[in-house]
Each structure stands twice: as structure tokens, then as C-alpha cells.
Image: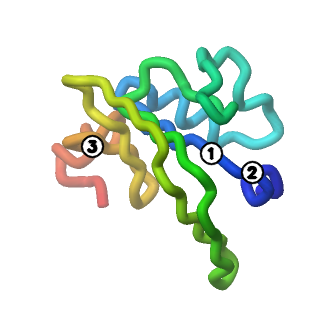
Amino acid sequence: MPALCEATHYAINVLTAEQQALAEQFARRDIDRWSGVDFTLGKSGAPLIANVAATFECFNRSRYDEGDHIIFVGQVESCTHLVDTSPLVYHGGRFYTEHLLGDAAVADEKGTAR
């Protein structure tokens, strides 16, 4: 977190539904999360992951401490997106796109996932 707090710019990379394994890699601890990740550096030097649904290059305009969280407000300076791709969403401990992904989808079809 200190690197993000001190940075003047950052990038938001919106993964595609096919990049669930990459999301899980970035969620792990005590590993090099960037190992094997194909990326380039954006205009400000922030990493832009290849073949993502969208990227947003942002100026770190302000930040607010709120309880045990920090809220960052970025000014978008550049953005890109891929056409005909589904974004990956993580909510409530599950991965989604337009529908549940993986084992949770199978369980939900049987009426057992909650």
C-alpha cells in the first residue's frame, strides 16, 4: 500500500472472464504476483496487463482515510477497452461475469450455492 499512496499515477486493469487464474494469482500472498504476467508500462509508468477487458490510467488526484480503508480518487487520463469481451467480477467470495463462473455455477444450477 505505501507504493500506491506515494504514487502520482496508477492503472486499473479490468480482467476478462478468461483471466480468473490471473486474479487468483494476484490475490495470493508471499509470491511474486507479476511472475509470468504479460504487461507493458503506460504513459506514467504504471503496468498495463495485456489482453484485459479495459485499462484506466489515472492521476492519483486525492485519497481519503476512512476507518481501516483508504479511498483513492483518480482522474482518468487514458483508457482502452476490448470489444466483445466479458469482464471478470468478484463479489461475495465468487467470480462472476454475466453469470457465476466455475464450481459455484454448477452448484447454483442445482440450487445448492448460497
Distance (Cα) linking label 1 and label 2:
7 Å
Q: Which residue is mark 3?
A: 100
Q: List x then y, in percent, for residue 86.
A: 26, 32
Q: Secondary structure at mark 1?
A: strand
Numbered disc total: 3
Q: Which residue is mark 1?
A: 10
Pointer 3: residues within 10 angstroms few (<14), some, or many (20+)?
Answer: some
Which quadrant: the C terminus?
bottom left
Mark nearer the N terminus (2 vs 3): 2
Distance (Cα) linking label 3 and label 1:
29 Å
CB under 8 Å between callouts 1 and 2? yes
Question: What residue lies at 57% left-to-right and 36% top-to-bottom?
Answer: 24
Q: Secondary structure at mark 2?
A: loop
- Left or right: where 67 falls relative to 76: right
Disc 3 marks which amino acid?
A: Leu
Q: Which residue is mark 2?
A: 7
Camera-side residue of 84 and 22: 84
Question: What residue lies at 19% left-to-right and 23% top-to-bottom?
Answer: 84
